[in-house]
Image (spheres, rainbow, N blue to C red):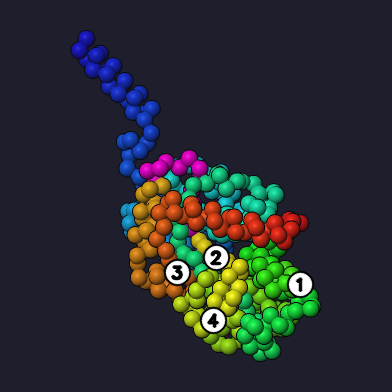
């Protein structure tokens, strides 16, 4: 009788444990974590993700494995994470394009911003207005005068991309007309810019630093309020009297909606610790990016402001998806 009672109590205990959330009896993380990067391997964004993954692995005691899912302007990778189990073991390298622009521009987006929870900011960097170094305009004022009273072709990394919308901001600010020449990404746009097929382009700092230093390209202004340490000789639009031309390219971490708060908090703490690594800070700085510690709530506020800023640009430009 006593043995039956003990067996019954044991069974009841197992049944009760099965009803508890996993965090009540297991410490997160128990296994490797997958970080989906919505870009191909080998680029600057991939390097950023791998640095963050390496440092977070050391903090968490579990490997963070980078899984490249490039294509469709970050949509393929984003969709994979949106549909993943919300258990803390699938993460997304989030971007300004993916969360501030695509949801307001792409009517066929297979997921919503509300399908994610956001963990933290990794880095941010400005966009820079560039032209071939031998262009006639030697500074922003000369460039603006040359753009008046004509329609200027300008390269973009694709319709609705950050480079395209930065151009919209700029040409609205100077009250001039432009014709976007859309490319399938930054690499082909830079090839034609350097070859003289298009006269100007709003580019990423990492993609253009080597050309700027070698005087193959001239930088007229950056889109953050201050200068970037990677290219301190290039003034900002703000300091040149155009504060409305403000755009930041940022990267962060996100997870599927429903991910346990315990996991989100652990990941946020690991990311904050990872960003303290000087080697990572130096590498980001070399690419024109900076790190900034933001709490989860501060990062959500940051994203909200960025979403609203790009929404105003899209509405003013009346840009519609093809």
User: Farthest residue toward the front?
Assistant: 241
Earlier in the chain: of badge 2 and badge 4, it is 4
Is residue 249 shown in magenta? no
Q: Is residue 43 above or below residue 29?
A: below
Mark linked to residue 234: 4
- Look at 57% across and 63% down and name the residue there: 40
Frontmost residue, 200 versus 36: 200
Q: Calculate the distance from the C-alpha at mark 3 to the C-alpha at mark 1.
A: 33 Å
Of marks 1 and 2, which one's residue comes earlier in the chain? 1
Upstream in sequence: badge 3 or badge 1? 1
Q: Residues within 10 Å of mark 4 (few under 14, many from 20)?
A: many
Residue beneath disc 3: 290
Q: From the image, state whether disc 2 or disc 4 is nearer to you.
A: 4
**Does label 1 or label 4 sit earlier along the sequence?**
1
In the shown orientation, is residue 16 left or right of residue 193? left
Q: Secondary structure at mark 1?
A: strand
Residue sticking out furthest to the top: 1
Residue 122's spot in the image, x, y percent?
45, 61
Q: Which of the numbered marks, if any, corresponds to residue 177?
A: 1
Q: Are marks 2 and 4 in contact (CB under 8 Å)?
A: no
Residue 249 image label:
2
Q: Quadrant of residue 128?
A: bottom right
Image mark for residue 157: none
- Image coordinates of residue 264 in percent, x first then y, are 41, 47
Q: Mark 3 or 2 closer to N-term? A: 2
**Can residue 253 be found in the magenta stretch?**
yes
What's drawn in magenta, residue-wise?
252-263
Residue 71: percent from left, percent from top = 63, 59
Relative to 308, say whether 156 is above or below.
Answer: below
């Amino acid at each position: 009788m006593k043995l039956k009672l003990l067996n019954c109590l044991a069974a009841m205990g197992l049944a009760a444990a099965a009803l508890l959330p996993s965090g009540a009896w297991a410490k997160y993380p128990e296994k490797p974590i997958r970080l989906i990067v919505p870009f191909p391997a080998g680029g600057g964004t991939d390097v950023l993700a791998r640095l963050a993954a390496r440092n977070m692995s050391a903090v968490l005691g579990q490997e963070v494995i980078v899984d490249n899912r490039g294509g469709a302007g970050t949509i393929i990778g984003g969709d994979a994470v949106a549909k993943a189990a919300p258990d803390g073991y699938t993460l997304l390298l989030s971007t300004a394009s993916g969360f501030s622009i695509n949801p307001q521009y792409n009517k066929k987006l297979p997921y919503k911003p509300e399908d994610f929870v956001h963990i933290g900011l990794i880095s941010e960097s400005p966009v820079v207005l560039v032209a071939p170094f031998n262009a006639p305009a030697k500074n922003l004022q000369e460039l603006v005068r040359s753009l008046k009273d004509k329609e200027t072709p300008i390269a973009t990394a694709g319709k609705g991309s950050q480079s395209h919308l930065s151009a919209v901001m700029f040409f609205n600010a100077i009250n001039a007309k432009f014709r976007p020449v859309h490319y399938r990404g930054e690499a082909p746009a830079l090839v034609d810019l350097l070859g003289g097929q298009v006269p100007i382009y709003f580019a990423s700092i990492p993609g253009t630093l080597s050309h700027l230093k070698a005087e193959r390209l001239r930088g007229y202004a950056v889109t953050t309020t201050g200068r970037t340490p990677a290219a301190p000789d290039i003034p900002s639009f703000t300091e040149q009297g155009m504060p409305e031309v403000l755009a930041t390219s940022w990267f962060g971490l996100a997870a599927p909606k429903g991910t346990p708060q315990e996991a989100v908090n652990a990941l946020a703490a690991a990311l904050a610790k990872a960003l303290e690594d000087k080697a990572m800070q130096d590498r980001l700085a070399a690419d024109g990016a900076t790190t900034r510690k933001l709490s989860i709530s501060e990062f959500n506020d940051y994203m909200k402001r960025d979403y609203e800023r790009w929404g105003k640009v899209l509405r003013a430009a009346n840009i519609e998806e093809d």
